[in-house]
Amino acid sequence: MIDQQKMIGLQFYPDKVIQALIKELPNPKWSNHFKMPYIINNQKNIDLIFEKFRGVAWLNCNYFYSDKVINRFNPIANLQPLKNRKLTKTYRVCPEEYLQKLLLKRYSQNTVRSYVNAFEAFINYYKNIELLSIGELEIRRYLRKLITEKKSNSYINLVINSIKFYYEIVLNMPNRFYAIERPRKQQKLPVVLCKEEILLIINNTNNLKHKCIVSLLYSAGLRRAELLNLKISDIDSKRMVIRVVHAKGNKDRYTLLSTNVLKDLRSYFKKYQPKHYLFEGPKGNPYSASSVKAIIEKAAKKSKITKRITPHTLRHSFATHLLENGTDLRYIQSLLGHSSSKTTEIYTHVATNTFRMIKNPLDL
């Protein structure tokens, strides 16, 4: 947006051929703010750019296709919990077109909730300013407030994404806030438990159902949501694998089924007789996420473990222990369902098997 008019920005590495072709476009101008040439955004100019640069350069024109579905296999998010909220009369709610665009692009339920909460917090901070009048100055001021409140870098990045989504995707204003700096991504290492601590937590659960939940999270490297969505038919005792359906990124995969856990699962099945989901609540619906968290926290406290432990800690421990036992990183990536090997490589920083080979200088 330049002078309240949509433009097409042309950003490229220095190249004499591209520079010469840009000069042939209708009335190209230079933007000191965006540090790139630009022309008026209309269909005729878009067609002309494709024609002019065909066979000369690859064009990244993602912003001109803002209705592109992120993940077409994602289930459509449920907006009813957002619409049924009890809010004060002065509360500024997320624009309806924002919600509809999130649905159209098939963002996940968690992403929809996170974006809406972050964007509403922002627009309520500037309750008396029209949304179209909000500029970089206001956004920077809001981000500084979040920094003083010691919000995490990941949360601040989420806020920036939610704001840019409205202006760039919903209102189709590409690079509206082009110069907003993002905080550096924090490289935090995962908390990992040793095998003895894992066994202590498993043995300090209250009952057989809780024991199976904790054991499966660790022995199969499952995310909490994956565990709660497991159906009885997903346990394949003949092949000794667990089928994980519609996991993160809407991907299916197989992971390991422990012989010891299978014995406990058979006893659990006879006692609790679940009908559909492997772990069910009182009405036959999936077991609640908060209950799983509470089970692990209580068992950890009972085990006198002082580390901050979550259900995901067991997944981190599973991956690290496999790596320490010599399992190839590619197999671990497959078991965890990671799209990129770079995500799995973080466990090389917490695995201690390589450290044991190094002689401490104080012990020499």
Image (spheres, rainbow, N blue to C red):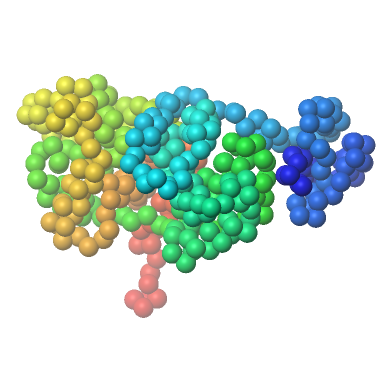
Q: Position of residue 62 (x, y in %)?
A: 66, 34
Q: Is residue 329 above or below residue 141?
A: above
Among the 4 quarters of the image, the one containing residue 112? top left
Counting labels gives 0
Q: To which quarter of the image does residue 333 belong?
A: top left
84 to 176, vertically: above or below = above
Question: What is the x, y in percent for residue 288?
Answer: 23, 37
**Residue 237 visible in the displayed image:** no
State the residue at coordinates (47%, 67%).
148
Q: Nearer the viewer, residue 64 or 100?
A: 100
**Going by the image, does 179 lie left or right of 195?**
right
Quadrant into which the N terminus falls: top right
Residue at the far front in the pictured view:
89
Q: Nearer the viewer, residue 27 or 308?
A: 27
Residue 171 percent across, percent down from the top left: 62, 37
Q: Name the quarter where the C terminus is drawn.
A: bottom left
Looking at the image, which residue is at 31% across and 34% down?
Answer: 226
Can the viewer see residue 125? Answer: yes
Q: Residue at x 16, y 52 (%)?
A: 298
- Taking the spot 59% from the left edge, 36% from the top edge, the residue there is 170
Report the side of 346 relative to 51 (left or right).
Answer: left
Q: Is residue 207 above or below residue 142?
A: above
Counting from the top left corner in percent of width and height, residue 128 is at 53, 52
